[in-house]
Image (spheres, rainbow, N blue to C red):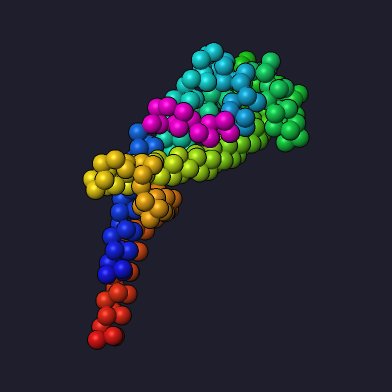
Amino acid sequence: MLSGNLSELVLAAGALGVAAYGLVEAFKWAWIGLIGFGKVEAEVGSPFAAQLMTAYGNEYPALLAAQYRNGRSKGELAKTLRQGIRIGLTKDNAPAAALALGGTLVTATALAQAAAAVASSADGALPPEHRATLGRFELAIDARIESALGLAESVYVGGARLHAMGAALLLAIVAAASIETATNASAWLFGMSAERWVTALVVGIVAVPLAPVANDLAGALQAVTKALRQKSA
């Protein structure tokens, strides 16, 4: 009986975790959708603001934020950053861009000369040394963008999980209070029994971690229960 109840509790907790995740996803339009975006701003947006502003205008932060909400590392943001920094590179902002990369892989003078050569080239043909400089610059930018998006994704996943756990805990308490009210109309929240409180807190806390494996875990518990019953019989 206890194992049966435990299986049902695991399934209920898993369903609650899925619902909590769905609730968090529904609020991506709010602050939740920008969790982790600060990593992109710190690693790419601020250091290469001059290039992005040249390419997309003064409102480029809103563009980047919108694309971050809509897909993050799996969306168009990486492409937008790469193209913006490359297109927006000029001889005037090239020294600052080289400095943002450390100034060793690509020097400020070499990058400024390469950017000036691009601007003055009618057919896009560049001397080998300028092509090499731009190639190293683009490689470093790609690595910086991938790193920033990876960090942002990690922060987002952790933040979304934390918000989902809070939502699951709140939903579990409300559900427990509703059940308590069904048997005692005057009880509701603060009149709940200690057992009901403990159950609600446990279910709310474990709901999100259990969500991906709830069905498998419940099936395993049922299989173990069946095997123990057959052995005892």
| Relative image position of residue 220 (x, y in whole percent) | 33, 69
Left or right of residue 131: residue 191: left
Locate the N terminus by quadrant.
bottom left
Magenta segment: 27-40
Does residue 67 show up?
no
Q: Residue at x 53, y 40 (%)?
A: 155
Q: Is residue 227 visible?
A: yes
Q: Quadrant of residue 49?
A: top right
Q: Quadrant of residue 122?
A: top right
Residue occupying image coordinates x 44% and y 41%:
166
Residue 7 drawn at (x, y percent):
30, 63
* Quadrant of image for the C terminus: bottom left
Residue 140, above or below 130: below
Q: In terms of image quadrants, where is residue 75?
A: top left
Instruction: Decide whether residue 76 is among the magenta residues.
Output: no
Instruction: Please tell me which residue lies in front, 210 or 117.
Output: 210
Residue occupying the point 64% across, 36% down? 140
Whether residue 155 is situated above or below residue 212 in the rendered picture: above
